[in-house]
């Protein structure tokens, strides 16, 4: 008799896929088409940064001379933007034992790299290796949040129910 693993996430699988697709559409809009992020204006100067941590360190070194909110949008915004991806992708794999964290982080890095390459080709936004680093951190954080909320809680529940 084959034992079926309990799914730790409360939404059905198809709903999780739909939510992930909606998230990716919204993310694409903000990354490539949003006027509030200067994606459609003619004034935008396109930049490429291939030196890791160059823009991140510049944000802190020149904090006082940068426009207000720049640090938040550039550093925190890039991390926050990918937290849902890490969380939602982990939820798609939640039926697997341990929820593969490395796969979630690798796909966060891959998705971010694809975004940066599209920005390079289309000249929308800026192509920045620091964005890949920050987005990957966001995906990892999303996975950690999923793990703490659902997987860890499930392990504790199973541990306490063993004695009963």
Image: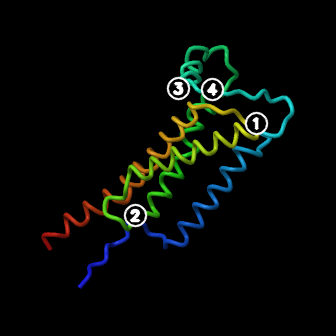
How far apart in space, not on screen, are marks 1 and 4 (Cα)?
13 Å
Q: Is residue 86 left or right of residue 39?
A: left
In this picture the colour scheme is: rainbow
Q: Residues within 10 Å of mark 3 (few under 14, many from 20)?
A: some
Q: Residue furthest bottom?
A: 1
What number of labels is visible?
4
Q: Which mark is residue 49?
A: 4
Q: Is residue 28 above or below residue 1?
A: above
Residue found at x 26% / y 65%: 157
Residue found at x 42% / y 52%: 103
How far apart in space, not on screen, are marks 3 and 1 (Cα)?
20 Å
Q: Is residue 72 above or below residue 82?
A: above
**Residue occupied by mark 3:** 52
Specify which label sits upstream in the sequence, 2 or 3: 3
Q: Residues within 10 Å of mark 1 (few under 14, many from 20)?
A: some
Q: Which element carries disc 2, helix, strand or loop? A: loop
Q: Are marks 2 and 1 in contact (CB under 8 Å)?
A: no
How far apart in space, not on screen, are marks 2 and 3 (Cα)?
32 Å
Q: Are marks 2 and 3 in contact (CB under 8 Å)?
A: no
Q: Which mark is residue 123?
A: 1
**Residue occupied by mark 2:** 94
Specify which label sits upstream in the sequence, 3 or 1: 3
Q: Nearer the viewer, residue 70 or 20?
A: 20
Q: Is residue 142 above or below residue 39?
A: below
């Amino acid at each position: 008799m084959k034992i079926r693993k309990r799914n730790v996430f409360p939404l059905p699988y198809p709903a999780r896929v739909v939510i992930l697709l909606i998230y990716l559409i919204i993310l694409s809009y903000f990354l490539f088409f949003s006027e509030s992020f200067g994606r459609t204006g003619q004034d935008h100067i396109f930049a490429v940064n291939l030196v890791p941590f160059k823009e991140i360190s510049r944000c802190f070194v020149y904090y006082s001379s940068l426009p207000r909110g720049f640090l938040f949008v550039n550093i925190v915004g890039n991390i926050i933007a990918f937290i849902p991806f890490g969380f939602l992708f982990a939820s798609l794999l939640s039926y697997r034992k341990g929820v593969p964290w490395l796969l979630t982080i690798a796909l966060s890095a891959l998705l971010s790299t694809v975004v940066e390459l599209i920005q390079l080709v289309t000249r929308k936004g800026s192509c920045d290796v620091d964005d890949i680093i920050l987005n990957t951190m966001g995906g990892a954080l999303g996975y950690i949040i999923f793990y703490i909320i659902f997987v860890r809680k499930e392990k504790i529940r199973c541990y306490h129910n063993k004695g009963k």
